Amino acid sequence: MRISPLPLAFASLSVASPALAADTLNGADTAWILTATALVLFMTLPGLALFYGGLVRAKNVLSVLMQCFAIAGVVSVLWLVAGYSLAFSEGNAWIGDLSKAMLAGVGRQTLSGSIPESLFFIFQMTFAIITPALILGAFAERMKFSAMLLFSAIWLFLVYIPVAHWVWGGGWLQHMGLYDFAGGTVVHITAGVASLVAALVIGPRKGFPQTPMTPHNLTMAVTGAGMLWVGWFGFNAGSALAADGNAAMAMVATHVSAAAGVLAWSAIEWWRFGKPSVLGAVTGMVAGLGTITPASGFVGPGGALLIGLLAGGVCFTATQTVKRVFKIDDSLDVFPVHGVGGMLGTLLAGVFAATGLGVFSGYGFAEGISSMAGQLGVQAVGVLATVVYTGVVTWGVLKLVDALTGLRVDEEAEVQGLDINLHEERGYDLL
């Protein structure tokens, strides 16, 4: 049996949703989304865990790995209990209902388009896992483990799930015609803006910005970054929800943008500082990946190349501005890379989806939208709504958690390191 069909506009605009056209199981589609699901989980565990773990100081490496694992566990259970239903059941323009809580009514034969609904459920779960995990980079090395767990659980329900419903679950932004192929608004803007708010509320690490806080293990960070690059093919190409040309072109766009991001960021560093850094190269890659995410299914290779180049330059400038000008300790640059990249990519999807740009042409605007100005207007509304909603609600969640548990470890614990203080373990045996 098929699941209840979502609005037709959603099926035509967004790919992270049940399709309406097919009502029989397609083995090729199912095999690909099974693979893509594993790739997206691989992005968090171990990809993001190693990337973030290598970027913090040695005394906090285990705390980051633990946070990634804990979020994967908490979000997975909450997604089953109610999260999936609230995001992807019919509900209204703002939120779904509880008709599919605990996967009620979903069996082995239940389909979501041409794949099992259980597969669509777990594919979407991996997106829900990585989004709050990204925010860890903003408050790394100073937040209580209990506060992190509580914040992640509440934030999932109050921010991620509503925005996912707006964009992918039949909500108001989807009806407007917003283009977000794989998570520019739902994942990157929400995580990026939440990170900026968290960094401001919790305050800087002790010694910032005077004391250098360099990555303790760039080899680990680069290894994790490589896993992110590979895993991102599941993230973007998997969002086609089919083994077809749309998925293949999304994979091409994803890779081209990542490569361009590496080159752009490295070139700027080389010009400004005399040497390109390894850290800059991998950060440029992440910027290219995050920025292409919302546009990956709507633009061609030429558009992806320009998006990646712009991502490297714009996100590099944003990183320098946040840290050096505004002195905000977004520890691992989540807002300037993911937040700014998500905004940029969401807007550029409205540009490079146009069909009259020669080698930079995309695949057309949303149904009912006939001009670049019209599509850009919808994209801008989506960006603005996501930024404002995420910022306000995240601030409220942080204040609530602070009142309940306190957000920050004490000064002694921060100096000693979270590994030994919160988990009674060390990342390295130095004897």
Image (cartoon, helix red, strand yellow):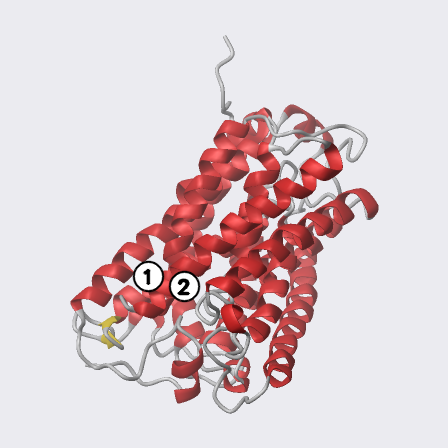
Residue tagged by mark 2?
250
Q: Amino acid at mark 2?
A: Ala
Q: Residue furthest bottom?
A: 368
Q: Position of residue 342 (x, y in %)?
A: 59, 61
Which residue is at a point 75% across and 45% down the rendered structure image? 320
Residue tagged by mark 1?
122
* Label annotation for residue 35: none
Q: Amino acid at mark 1?
A: Ile
Sooner in the amino-acid sequence: mark 1 or mark 2: 1
In the picture provided, is 105 more to the left or to the right than 138?
left
Q: Position of residue 221 (x, y in %)?
A: 51, 34
Which residue is at a point 66% across and 67% down the rendered structure image? 387
In the rendered image, is residue 154 in sight? no
Q: Position of residue 54 (x, y in %)?
A: 54, 32
The front one of 6 and 285 is 285
Q: Are marks 1 and 2 in contact (CB under 8 Å)?
A: no
Q: Position of residue 245 (x, y in %)?
A: 31, 68
Calculate the distance from the C-alpha at mark 1 to the C-alpha at mark 2: 21 Å
**Mark 1 or mark 2, which is nearer to you?**
2
Is 336 placed above or below 351 here? Answer: above
